[in-house]
């Protein structure tokens, strides 16, 4: 937004979000950022009074923060001298990826869940079930569909441990890195492309196991259009029409061999559902 439309930031503001890049903890820091990086004045500015930061995580590439009102935000927190670390064990466990994935269109993580994990002192983890199905689609190139159910036990100093189950699924084309503990393609090959990545989080083991069984349905890692038609219960014409209308087909195509195009089935289902 133009600089003249930047809202007046109250002196008692405790969270000022400047676009998706920066989250400031006070008005003076926000004003200093506007002076240092004027382009931030063109971003959406969100001002809140009251919420306090509980955890600051991430790295130089992408920061994130958890807040007392239950929100989890992307962006680097300023000033950098403020670094509460009440979700350290959760971040070290890898569960933090479920937090940040929620910000990219996946299901929001219920704050009633992650707030119970504040001040955990450590964790242990175990692979409960895993499967890696591969399909070769050209010499020396293959695709893998990896499904893994992993349990995490979070430890606390003042109460019993808590268990949570994380189900992860992704499709990797070419020679790519599998999930930890799952045999699959060569993890050192830089040509790998993760074409689809999904996560589900559970506090109930039976529900987690049921979802693993539902996802482990034997579908191929990648399919041709002809193979997808019966799997999606549609027609060849309808599927081709859906692809012609989608604007992200090229970057999400899993591979091309001769005149054959390969796709992740979930991507085809999304394009088909979006067809008018």
Image (tube, rainbow, N blue to C red):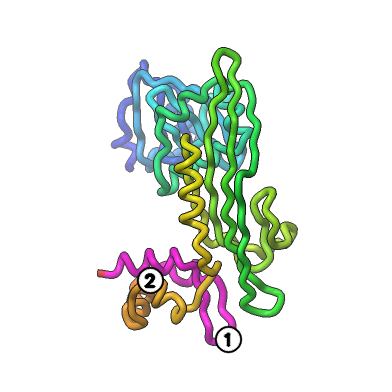
Secondary structure, mark 2, is: helix
The residue carrying mark 1 is 258
Q: Is residue 206 visible?
A: yes
Task: Report the residue at 59% width, 42% height from top.
Answer: 150
Query: Closer to the camera, 256 or 15?
Result: 256
User: Residue 25, percent across and down?
Assistant: 46, 23
Total number of numbered discs in the rendering: 2
> At 67% from the left edge and 65% from the top edge, which residue is drawn?
191
Mark 2, residue position: 232
Image vertical order of residue 167 relative to residue 275, above or below: above
Is 24 rendered above or below residue 201? above
Q: Residue at x 52, y 75 (%)?
A: 262
Query: Is residue 101 rendered to the left or right of residue 130?
Result: left
Quadrant where the N terminus lies?
top left
Residue 21 in view of the camera: no
In the picture, the quarter occupied by the C terminus is: bottom left
Query: Where does the magenta region start and end?
Result: 247-275
Residue at image coords 36%, 82% = 236
Mark 2 surroundings within 10 Å by alpha-carbon count, few (fewer than 14), some (14 through 19), many (20 or more): some
| Residue 233 horizontal/vertical position (percent) | 35, 73
Point out the tag, 2 or 1, that comes first from the N-terminus. 2
Above or below, 48 against 220 in this view is: above
To which quarter of the image does residue 69 belong? top left
């Amino acid at each position: 937004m133009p600089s003249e439309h930047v809202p007046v930031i109250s002196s008692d503001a405790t969270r000022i979000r400047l676009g998706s890049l920066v989250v400031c903890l006070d008005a003076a820091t926000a004003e200093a950022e506007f002076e240092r990086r004027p382009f931030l004045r063109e971003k959406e500015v969100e001002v809140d009074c009251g919420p306090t930061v509980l955890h600051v995580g991430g790295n130089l590439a992408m920061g994130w923060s958890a807040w007392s009102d239950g929100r989890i935000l992307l962006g680097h927190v300023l000033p950098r001298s403020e670094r509460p670390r009440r979700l350290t064990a959760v971040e070290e466990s890898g569960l933090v990826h479920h937090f940040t994935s929620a910000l990219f269109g996946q299901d929001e993580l219920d704050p009633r869940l992650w707030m119970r994990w504040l001040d955990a002192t450590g964790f242990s983890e175990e692979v409960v079930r895993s499967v890696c199905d591969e399909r070769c689609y050209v010499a020396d190139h293959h695709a893998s569909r990896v499904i893994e159910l992993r349990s995490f036990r979070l430890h606390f100093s003042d109460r019993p441990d808590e268990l949570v189950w994380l189900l992860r699924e992704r499709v990797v084309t070419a020679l790519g890195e599998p999930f930890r503990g799952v045999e699959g393609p060569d993890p050192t090959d830089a040509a790998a492309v993760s074409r689809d990545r999904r996560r589900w989080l559970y506090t109930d083991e039976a529900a987690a196991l049921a979802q693993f069984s539902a996802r482990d349905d034997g579908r191929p890692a990648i399919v041709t259009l002809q193979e997808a038609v019966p799997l999606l219960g549609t027609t060849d014409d309808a599927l081709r029409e859906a692809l012609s209308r989608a604007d992200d087909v090229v970057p999400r195509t899993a591979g091309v061999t001769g005149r054959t195009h390969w796709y992740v089935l979930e991507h085809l289902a999304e394009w088909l559902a979006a067809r008018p």
